[in-house]
Image (spheres, rainbow, N blue to C red):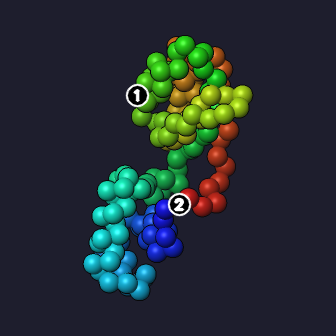
Amino acid sequence: MLNKQDQQLLLKLRQNARSSISDLARALSVSRSTVQNRIAKLEAGGVIRGYSVQLGGEFSANQVEAHVSIKVFQKLTSRTNTALEQISQVSQLYSVSGEYDLIAIVQAQSLEELSAILDEIGNLEGVERTNSAVVLETRFRR
């Protein structure tokens, strides 16, 4: 169970995972050692699994993103998941309930590249059908 201080710390880290311990301590009005101990505890408990790079600037602004719903033949789910993991433009893959089995988040440099990736996904062994929604605007991301 996360307390309010842990939740605030996670929010600050999600906003900027490279924030220094001193900056985090100042923002949360606690000591540096408290921040260090909380981060260590969150990492040890598996709440924080790692830190990653968020693309920004012109590079990110020029990317095209789509959410691709994927219906999979059940006996080929594992093979399909493995194949999707090999496509570098698939940044996230979710197993979901409902009509479709998976949702893939695809990021491409152009609409042409996105179209080619969608064709590649649709042609994977085990994929029954897909449905894509291109992201027009990101309102916020944490």
State the image coordinates of residue 130 (x, y, percent, origin top left).
65, 25
* Circle 2 SS class: loop
**Residue 56 left/right relative to 35:** right
Is 22 above or below relative to 93?
below
Point out the tag, 2 or 1, that comes first from the N-terminus: 1
* Three-letter code for the amino acid on which mark 2 is drawn: Arg
Please name the residue that numbered disc 2 is placed on: 142
State the image coordinates of residue 140 (x, y, percent, origin top left).
60, 61
Q: Quadrant of residue 121?
A: top right
Is 72 above or below relative to 69?
above
Counting other residues with Cα less than 10 Å from the Cα at mark 1, is it few (<14), some (14-19), or many (20 or more)?
few
- Find the distance from the CA under tag 2 to the CA under tag 1: 25 Å
State the image coordinates of residue 73 (x, y, percent, origin top left).
60, 15
* Three-letter code for the amino acid on which mark 1 is drawn: Gln
Of 69 and 75, nearer the camera is: 75
Of 71 and 75, nearer the camera is: 75
Is 130 above or below relative to 38?
above
**Residue 18 left/right relative to 89:** left
**Residue 112 left/right relative to 78:** right
Residue at point 71% right, 32% down? 98
* Circle 1 SS class: loop
Please name the residue that numbered disc 1 is placed on: 86
Counting other residues with Cα less than 10 Å from the Cα at mark 2, is it few (<14), some (14-19), or many (20 or more)?
few
